[in-house]
């Protein structure tokens, strides 16, 4: 039996003991035997089959039936993996787009607009930095460039650097960095709706927030009221890892009365209790929220170096810089320091769990090397029992559709049989696919809304 067939058998046998109500309250589908040959072999053999007339017609029908059963089998496996008692989610910026939190380029435009209102050194420095960068640069490139100059100023005897012919001090560089970070936090906190189809841009503010929690709440309900049905006594917490700075996951969990752990102790003002080397988070709770890149409500205390969770506008504890990993090239280095090192240690442990487990990914572009490295390192271990389910969009180029390069490499690797990729063009399983290609409009099951629907009604609902 091939390795792929063994993996399929293992996945099915592991799922067979799950109660029917896990499968979204529907009766368990009948077991389907997957053919040993991949779909491409089965289909290509049709054209080479001997026989004519009714014999050839019958053979084509049998081959079509086998392909249809194979497609159905993969959808059943996808549903079973998503109902696993040991599942983690990695959630990126894409899940907050529907909540009116902008992606990179609209965020860049908004931050630059905020800074343009300041006629002092921050604007002068930003203009000088932009003069040295490509016209296609965004806020990540700007902050990375600023970080490079800050490092030079810190090593310089004079504490000064020249940027596009203009001189700036180390203090001016740091102040501009803080200005940019505060502009990012303000935009994420209150939301932004970019101009579209002739409608003007809308900017959120404290008295008129544009942030919409609808889809986050739907996802939480789908996870805990549908996909977890009947499993609350049989599995540990749902692990939610996110690169996002917003607090929508935490808010949605609270509004759904789901108990969660986030590493902090206290109330509206809280201190970070979990550090690198601390015991594992408690298992007698519904969810763990692990923010890999920090949060808009985390502050680093000036005097004690503690990480605090605070309310907007609080003047205590002593305000320090916002404890975020900003969108810049130094993210990898920042991830090696507490509290972020502790967050990545939790991510690493979830991926290297000795039991059968699933990592589902949504809204993440696979553009952060330090996260991709963690996934690849754990998945490639010889004893790894992790299945990766990635929800991603295939981008169009001159050669057709294209997956993110990391996913393309992973699905064709030696462990690719444990990689499922649900895209707008169908479902990939390892090096095979796409299965279930849409006949007209693209599939939307790769979106955050689509994932919630999948958890609520199953993969087959997209073809019903």
Image: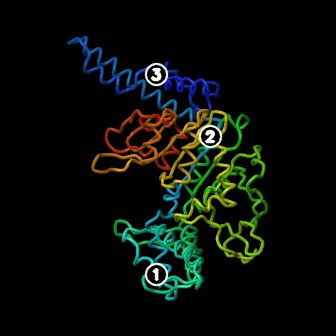
Q: Earlier in the sequence, mark 1 or mark 2?
A: 2
Q: Residue 342: percent from the left, percent from the top?
A: 69, 55
* Numbered disc 1: secondary structure: strand
* Numbered disc 3: secondary structure: loop
> Would you say the residues marked 1 and 3 are in contact, meaning their CB atoms lie under 8 Å apart?
no
Identify the residue at the far left of this view: 53
Q: Residue 388: percent from the left, percent from the top?
A: 54, 39
Q: Nearer the viewer, mark 1 or mark 2?
A: 1
* In the depicted structure, whether residue 34 falls above or below residue 300: above
Q: Who's the residue at 48% across and 19% down the image?
A: 33
> Would you say the residues marked 3 and 2 are in contact, meaning their CB atoms lie under 8 Å apart?
no
* In the depicted structure, whether residue 335 falls above or below residue 48: below
Check disc 2: other Cα within 10 Å, few if <14, some if 14-19, many if 20+: many
Residue 163: assigned label: 1
Distance CA(mark 1)–CA(mark 2): 48 Å
Q: Is residue 50 left or right of residue 250?
A: left
């Amino acid at each position: 039996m091939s390795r792929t067939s063994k993996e399929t058998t293992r996945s099915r046998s592991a799922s067979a003991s799950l109660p029917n109500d896990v499968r979204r309250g529907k009766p368990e589908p009948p077991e389907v035997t997957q053919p040993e040959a991949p779909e491409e072999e089965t289909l290509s053999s049709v054209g080479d089959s001997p026989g004519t007339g009714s014999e050839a017609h019958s053979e084509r029908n049998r081959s079509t039936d086998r392909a249809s059963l194979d497609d159905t089998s993969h959808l059943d496996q996808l549903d079973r993996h998503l109902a696993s008692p040991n599942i983690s989610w990695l959630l990126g910026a894409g899940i907050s787009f529907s909540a009116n939190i902008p992606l990179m380029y609209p965020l860049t435009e908004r931050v630059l607009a905020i800074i343009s209102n300041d006629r002092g050194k921050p604007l002068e420095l930003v203009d000088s930095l932009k003069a040295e960068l490509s016209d296609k640069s965004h806020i990540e490139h700007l902050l990375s460039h600023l970080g490079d100059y800050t490092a030079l100023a810190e090593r310089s005897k004079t504490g000064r650097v020249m940027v596009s012919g203009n001189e700036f001090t180390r203090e001016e560089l740091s102040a501009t960095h803080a200005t940019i970070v505060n502009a990012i936090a303000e935009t994420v906190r209150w939301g932004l709706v970019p101009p579209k189809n002739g409608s003007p841009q809308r900017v959120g503010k404290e008295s008129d927030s544009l942030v919409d929690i609808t889809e986050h709440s739907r996802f939480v309900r789908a996870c805990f009221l549908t996909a977890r049905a009947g499993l609350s006594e049989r599995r540990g917490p749902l692990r939610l890892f996110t690169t996002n700075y917003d607090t929508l996951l935490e808010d949605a969990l609270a509004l759904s009365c789901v108990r969660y752990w986030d590493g902090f102790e206290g109330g509206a003002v809280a201190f970070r209790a979990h550090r690198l080397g601390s015991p594992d988070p408690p298992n007698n709770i519904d969810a763990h929220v692990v923010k890999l890149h920090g949060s808009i409500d985390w502050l680093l205390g000036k005097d004690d170096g503690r990480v605090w969770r605070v309310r907007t506008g609080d003047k205590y504890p002593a305000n320090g810089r916002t404890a975020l990993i900003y969108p810049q090239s130094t993210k990898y280095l920042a991830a090696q320091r507490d509290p972020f090192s502790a967050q990545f240690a939790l991510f690493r442990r979830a991926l290297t769990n000795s039991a059968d487990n699933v990592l589902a990914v949504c809204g993440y572009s696979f553009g952060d090397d330090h996260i991709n490295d963690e996934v690849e390192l754990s998945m490639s271990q010889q004893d790894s029992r992790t299945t990766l389910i990635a929800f991603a969009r295939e981008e169009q180029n001159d050669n057709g559709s294209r997956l993110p390069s990391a996913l393309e490499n992973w699905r064709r690797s030696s462990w690719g049989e444990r990689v499922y990729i649900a895209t707008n063009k169908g479902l990939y399983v390892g090096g095979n696919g796409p299965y279930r290609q849409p006949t007209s409009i693209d599939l939307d099951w790769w979106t955050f809304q689509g994932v919630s629907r999948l958890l609520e009604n199953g993969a087959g609902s997209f073809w019903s």
